[in-house]
Amino acid sequence: MGYKNLSFPKGAKFLVTGSAGFIGSNLVEAILNLGYQVRGLDNFSTGKEENVELFMNHPNYEFIKGDICELETCIKACEGVDFVLHQAAWGSVPRSIEMPLLYEEINIKGTLNMMEAARQNGVKKFVYASSSSVYGDEPNLPKKEGREGNVLSPYALTKMVNEEYGKLYTKLYGLDTYGLRYFNVFGKRQDPNGAYAAVIPKFIKQLLDNKSPTINGDGKQSRDFTYIENVIEANLKACKANSIAAGQSYNIAYGEREFLIDIYTHLCSALGKDIEPIFGAERKGDIKHSNADISKAKELLGYEPEWSFERGIEAAIEWYQKDLNQAAIIL
């Protein structure tokens, strides 16, 4: 169970792209704690410098400030690397609808650059972030690999294209690729600020600030919220997977679903707040309901998520309370 007992060859080196971001920085921390070498790559377009500074004094960590849209940078970053955990991308469905050309450049071209760099450097495993958004308008629950609908946003399309390239790079070039379809990941270091912030950190921060959060739609949409520790486990277990499992995509979630209005009520209760939310318009490109069938990841990757939503949200609330208190003291 979990990932803390996983072992890799002595001196194993991991490259984490997007290492200044939420998921990337948590991966860096977990791998360093296991005793392996990590190289980070980020250009700070969405990541934070403080997430890099956390580890800069660690003897097993090195950082490259660079852009995945530049092939030479990607090739340099992959030199001497055994495992690539490719998290660098621009997220947010609404923002992708506003900026489709930028998403094409970063999420598609950038990912292709990384796959090519990994191939040229003989990387053993290339694990990359895909998304539950690839299911689009497919109405059935739970969501199951191989049963996708029409994508609803440029962001979702970029992730679908990444998966097709992943299949090709395994089939044509023998690069073991593993696409991880993340379902609404949350946890420590997820940014609560900005117009495109994820819903859980945004709600927590606004409630702590005694403000009324806006719920897009009626609050009856559901999500398979997935705590960050489960995502770390999936990435590291993909690095240990049999090559038979390569060239495929996997749902990474807990396998349950929560309704947004219930989460809001839960957060109010946990934080001791009695604040009415504001109900706004539904967001373009959003999927109404999301719930994952994780049986394929369990079978082929050995994925056994330990962190339920309840356990994860408790840890997340504790972290945000501490972090935001520290920020207030600094200010």
Image (spheres, rainbow, N blue to C red):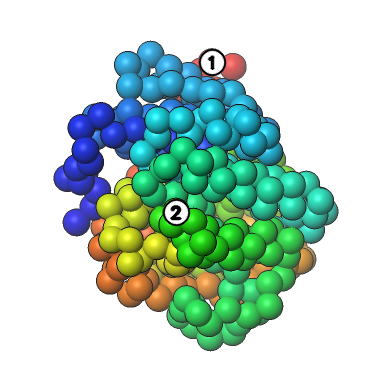
Residue under the image location 36 percent in, 39 percent down: 82
Considering only vertical position in the picture, is 43 above or below 289? above
Dot 2: element: loop
Residue 44 visible somewhere in the drawing: no
Considering only vertical position in the picture, is 13 above or below 294? above
Seen from the viewer's position, the closer of residues 84 and 304 is 84
Give coordinates of residue 188: x percent, y percent.
44, 40
Dot 1: element: helix
The nearer-to-camera label among 1 and 2 is 2
Residue under the image location 68 percent in, 64 percent down: 157
Seen from the viewer's position, the closer of residues 126 and 191 is 126
Considering only vertical position in the picture, is 195 above or below 20? below
Q: Is there CB contact under 8 Å for labels 1 and 2?
A: no
Q: Earlier in the sequence, mark 1 or mark 2?
A: 2
Crowding near pointer 2: few (<14 within 10 Å), some, many (20+)? many
Q: Quadrant of residue 168?
A: bottom right
Outermost bottom residue: 140
Question: Residue flagged by tag 1: what amino acid is it?
Answer: Ile
- Write down the residue under mark 1: 330
